[in-house]
């Protein structure tokens, strides 16, 4: 999540971040704000982003926009780059102190290890999980010419990443977790993916072992507590105690993992599989 930068004779650490995509309904969000934003440095202990020049239309904008965290407001804001550090005039805002802007509209962190992701078990029984999550969501607000703000519920900042990936291994590998995975959401500030299990035909004869294997489904996710990318069965999602494969790497995305993947030997240990890797599909 961080990288050392040289500044003369000194070294300082900066947080790393992937690029972001800002989207929204054109009826509520000005065209000039929509586009790809790239990380450019650090400000107020968080990464700030500047809109990519290729996404700017001179018909709708006079220049790129800047996405940054305003400490005095406790908000993520959009301004002109020349206004970085000056939050008196903002083009859009969201009330959130999230570390990453793609979590701002979610009301906090997606990390299970932080207080912002308190388990539902500590909540009253009449609070449904969906109700709690919906209640914590925050909407971006866009400035109008009059100086007022209106809510843009469809406006959001999201990670630019693959929607489908493939878990591959050697040609004769029989790991049940191999195959195509589809992105399902965010956890620990990173995307997680669920295995796509093909539906068996009604007339297909299966022995009990094949039938049991067909019911298995796996999830690929990042555990910030273990600082590892993990592959577990779906019912063990967010449980790092029993995993089928792991890689000790904090890369933002699983296809960027450079550490060797280790596969469970079913006896409590792990062995390296040098041919196991993740490939982004689309």
Image (cartoon, rainbow, N blue to C red):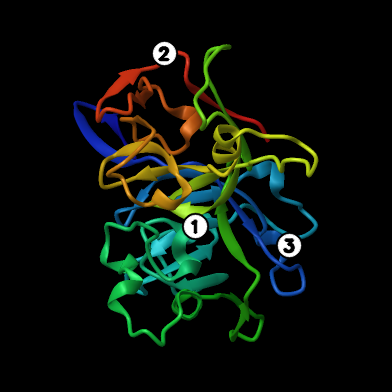
Q: Between 265 and 117, which is closer to the camera in this rendering?
A: 265
Query: Residue shown at 73%/62% (left/top)?
Result: 31
Q: Where in the figure is residue 263, as x and y percent of width and height? A: 37, 25
Q: Nearer the viewer, mark 1 or mark 3?
A: 1
Task: In the rendered structure, find residue 67 and report the number of the disc placed on it.
Answer: none
Foreground: disc 2 or disc 3: 2
Residue at image point 46% right, 65% down: 104
**Frontmost residue, 147 versus 265:** 265
Position of residue 239 relative to residue 265, above or below, is below
Task: Identify the residue at image location x=29%, y=54%.
Answer: 45
Neighbourhood count class around disc 3 (C-alpha, 10 Å): few under 14, some 14–19, many 20 upward: some
- Mark 1–mark 3 distance (CA, rounded to whole Å): 19 Å
- Name above or below for residue 271 compared with residue 2: above
Q: Earlier in the sequence, mark 1 or mark 3?
A: 3
Label 3 secondary element: helix
> Considering depth in this image, is 7 or 169 the residue closer to the camera?
169
Q: Residue beneath label 3, please?
A: 31
Instruction: Please identify the quarter of the rendering in which residue 242 is found.
Output: top left
In the rendered view, would you say 1 is above or below 173?
Answer: below
Q: CA distance from mark 1 to mark 2?
A: 33 Å
Q: Is residue 202 above or below residue 95?
A: above
- On residue 274, the disc is 2
Is any atom of residue 275 visible in this view?
yes
Q: Which residue position holds label 1?
A: 102
Q: Is residue 92 left or right of residue 30?
A: left
The residue carrying pointer 2 sits among few (fewer than 14), some (14 to 19) or many (20 or more) residues within 10 Å by Cα, namely few
SS of the residue at dot 2? loop
Q: Earlier in the sequence, mark 2 or mark 3?
A: 3
């Amino acid at each position: 999540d961080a990288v050392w930068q040289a500044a003369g004779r000194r070294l300082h650490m900066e947080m790393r971040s992937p690029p972001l995509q800002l989207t929204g309904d054109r009826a509520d969000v000005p065209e000039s704000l929509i586009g790809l934003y790239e990380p450019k440095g650090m400000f107020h202990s968080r990464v700030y982003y500047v809109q990519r020049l290729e996404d700017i239309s001179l018909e709708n904008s006079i220049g790129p926009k800047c996405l940054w965290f305003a400490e005095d407001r406790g908000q993520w804001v959009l301004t002109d780059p020349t206004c970085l550090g000056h939050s008196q005039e903002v083009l859009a805002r969201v009330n959130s102190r999230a570390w990453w802007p793609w979590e701002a509209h979610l009301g906090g962190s997606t990390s299970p290890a932080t207080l912002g992701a308190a388990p539902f078990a500590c909540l009253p029984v009449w609070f449904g999980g969906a109700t709690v999550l919906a209640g914590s969501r925050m909407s971006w607000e866009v400035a109008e010419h009059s100086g007022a703000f209106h809510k843009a519920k469809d406006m959001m900042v999201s990670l630019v990443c693959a929607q489908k990936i493939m878990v591959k291994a050697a040609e004769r590998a029989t790991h049940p977790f191999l195959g195509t995975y589809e992105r399902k959401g965010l956890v620990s500030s990173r995307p997680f993916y669920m295995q796509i299990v093909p539906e068996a035909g009604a007339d297909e004869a299966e022995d009990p072992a094949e039938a049991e294997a067909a019911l298995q489904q796996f999830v690929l996710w990042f555990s910030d507590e273990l600082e590892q990318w993990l592959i577990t069965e779906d019912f063990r999602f967010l449980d790092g105690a029993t995993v089928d494969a792991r890689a000790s790497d904090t890369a933002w995305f699983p296809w960027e993992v450079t550490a060797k993947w280790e596969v469970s030997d079913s006896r409590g240990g792990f062995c390296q599989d040098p041919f196991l890797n993740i490939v982004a599909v689309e």
